[in-house]
């Protein structure tokens, strides 16, 4: 090895060592700065997600449409109802005035407005474990009566849920639309 090469090698080792020490010092300084920086104190705002409960009873009249073998008859009913239970009361009144199977009940109904249209979501509680005796025409009358009654009370379109879920079949025979258009 020549003397010149050995000097270059010593200078190079010294410079490399200096660079490694400086890099370690920078990393240590950054870590110290990061650990000393004040962490933000996050406070989450409490959001009220409850639906406003309109408990004021209002006497109102509404119309129900009763279909029997495609023949429509309407009745005007006067009842005290709460605004947030309006569609549930209307559909339960419809059930009281029609011959529905005992295993078919209206469990809930809500109204929604979207793009200047009024929609209703109707949840039917149907005991699928029972053998429900119902003809296709009876089932069609019930479904069409629900639709006509909701239209007469300001609803543009509706969807039916069965036991809280979308279903392709209403009670036993008829298919249902899925989702809102």
Image (spheres, grey):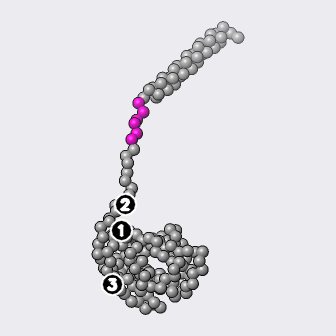
Would you call the spot at circle 2 few (<14 residues within 10 Å), some (14-19), or many (20 or more)?
A: few
Would you call the spot at circle 1 few (<14 residues within 10 Å), some (14-19), or many (20 or more)?
A: some
Disc ID at residue 84: 1
Indicate the secondary structure of the residue bearing disc 1. helix
Q: Residue at x 44, y 87 (%)?
A: 67
Name the spot of residue 17 as percent of width and height, x first.
58, 16
Where is residue 147, by image quadrant? bottom left
Q: Is residue 159 left or right of residue 117?
A: right
**Quadrant housing the C terminus:** bottom left
Range of magenta residues: 38-43
**Viewer-proximal residue among 99 and 66:** 99
Above or below, comparing residue 81 to residue 141 in the picture = above
Disc ID at residue 76: 3
CA distance separating discs 2 and 3: 30 Å
**Between disc 3 and disc 1, whose residue precedes?**
3
**Quadrant housing the N terminus:** top right
Name the spot of residue 48 as percent of width and height, x first.
37, 53
- Looking at the image, which residue sits at the far top? 3
What residue does disc 2 label? 51
Indicate the secondary structure of the residue bearing disc 3. strand
CA distance separating discs 3 and 1: 20 Å
Given contact means CB atoms under 8 Å apart, are the residues at marks 2 and 1 in contact? yes
Q: Is residue 61 left or right of residue 8?
A: left
**Between disc 2 and disc 3, whose residue precedes?**
2
Disc ID at residue 169: none
């Amino acid at each position: 090895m020549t003397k010149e090469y050995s000097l270059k090698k010593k200078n190079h080792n010294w410079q490399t060592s200096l660079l490694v020490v400086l890099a370690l010092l920078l990393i240590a300084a950054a870590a110290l700065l990061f650990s000393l920086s004040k962490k933000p104190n996050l406070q989450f705002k409490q959001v009220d997600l409850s639906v406003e409960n309109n408990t004021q009873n209002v006497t109102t009249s509404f119309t129900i449409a009763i279909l029997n073998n495609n023949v429509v008859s309407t009745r005007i009913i006067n009842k005290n109802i709460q605004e947030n239970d309006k569609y549930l009361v209307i559909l339960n009144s419809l059930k009281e005035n029609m011959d529905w199977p005992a295993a078919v009940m209206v469990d809930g109904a809500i109204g929604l407005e979207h793009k200047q249209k009024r929609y209703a979501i109707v949840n039917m509680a149907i005991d699928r474990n029972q053998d429900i005796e119902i003809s296709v025409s009876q089932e069609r009358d019930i479904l069409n009566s629900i639709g006509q009654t909701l239209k007469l009370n300001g609803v543009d379109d509706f969807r039916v849920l069965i036991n809280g879920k979308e279903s392709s079949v209403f009670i036993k025979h008829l298919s249902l639309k899925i989702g809102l258009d």
